[in-house]
């Protein structure tokens, strides 16, 4: 599984480079979040109840801050 991110678009997520990631853990088997490295996140409006379109992104983190969004 992957993390659910709290951003309604990949564009909004990209504007948050240099800030901590807003996310929700989804795994029953332990934390997937890493302070340094790459994670895969998704915005799933049907699960979160928010509006917008579904998207997936690879987020690179360093010291708990967003460095890159792809």
Image (spheres, rainbow, N blue to C red):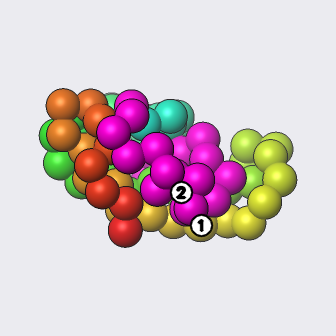
Residues at discs 1 and 2 in contact (Cβ within 8 Å): yes
In the rendered image, which quarter contains the C terminus?
Answer: bottom left
In the rendered image, which quarter contains the N terminus?
Answer: bottom left
Of the numbered discs 1 and 2, the one sitting upstream in the chain is: 2
Q: Which residue is mark 1?
A: 55
Disc 1 is placed on an element classified as strand
| Residue 21 location (% of width, % of height) | 42, 36
- Left or right: residue 22 compared with residue 17: right
Q: What's the magenta region?
A: 1-20
Q: Nearer the viewer, residue 67 or 49?
A: 67
- Tell me if I can see residue 48 in this picture: yes
| Residue 49 location (% of width, % of height) | 82, 44
Q: Is residue 11 magenta?
A: yes
Q: Quadrant of residue 45?
A: bottom right
| Residue 28 location (% of width, % of height) | 44, 36
Q: Is residue 37 above or below residue 40?
A: above
- Left or right: residue 58 compared with residue 64: right
């Amino acid at each position: 599984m992957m993390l659910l991110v709290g951003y309604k678009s990949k564009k909004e997520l990209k504007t948050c480079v240099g800030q901590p990631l807003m996310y929700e853990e989804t795994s029953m088997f332990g934390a997937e979040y890493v302070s340094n490295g790459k994670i895969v996140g998704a915005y799933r409006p049907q699960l979160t109840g928010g509006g917008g379109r579904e998207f997936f992104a690879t987020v690179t983190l360093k010291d708990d801050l967003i460095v890159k969004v792809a």
